[in-house]
Image: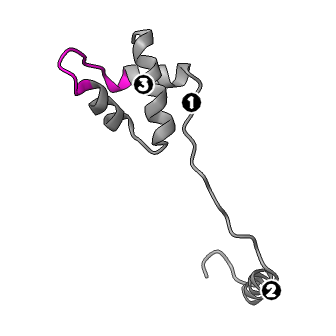
Amino acid sequence: MQERYKRPLTRIIKRDRRATLPQIAAYFSAGPSTSVTERTIQRNIIDMGFRSRRPIRVPLKTAQHKALRLACACQHRHWTVDD
């Protein structure tokens, strides 16, 4: 990929962080003279320092959750593997 295409690629990524590789490839392939594969875009995105990440929010355990878990464990502590 030429240097002049890396700047628009950066703008696309920063504008829409959830854009997928096929969406970005479709944007670049929309012009009549350029055809860019998804693998080329992926390689250049990684070279530019962008990484994919999934934001994960985990609810914290409350005292009620801990009490319920302990009660369940106490009820089933004598169970065997077959039970």
Q: Choose the circle earlier in sequence order: 3 or 2.
A: 3
- Mark 3: give few (<14), some (14-19) or many (20+) Cα within 10 Å: few
Q: Choose the circle earlier in sequence order: 3 or 1.
A: 3
Q: Marks 3 and 1, Cα distance to the nearest angstrom?
A: 14 Å
Q: Where's residue 45, x and y in %? A: 49, 25
**Residue 74 versus residue 79: which sits nearer the camera?**
74
**Residue 73 versus residue 43: which sits nearer the camera?**
43
Residue tagged 3: 8
Residue at point 54% right, 19% down? 47
Residue tagged 2: 67
Q: Is residue 55 above or below residue 27?
A: below
Which structural element holds mark 3? helix
Q: Is residue 23 above or below residue 34?
A: below
Q: Amino acid at mark 3?
A: Pro
Q: Is residue 43 visible?
A: no
- Mark 1: give few (<14), some (14-19) or many (20+) Cα within 10 Å: few
Q: Which residues are magenta?
A: 29-39
**Residue 62 versus residue 23: which sits nearer the camera?**
23
Q: Marks 3 and 2, Cα distance to the nearest angstrom?
A: 54 Å
Q: Amino acid at mark 2?
A: Ala
Q: Amino acid at mark 1?
A: Phe
Q: Tell me which colouring the rendered structure shows.
A: one colour
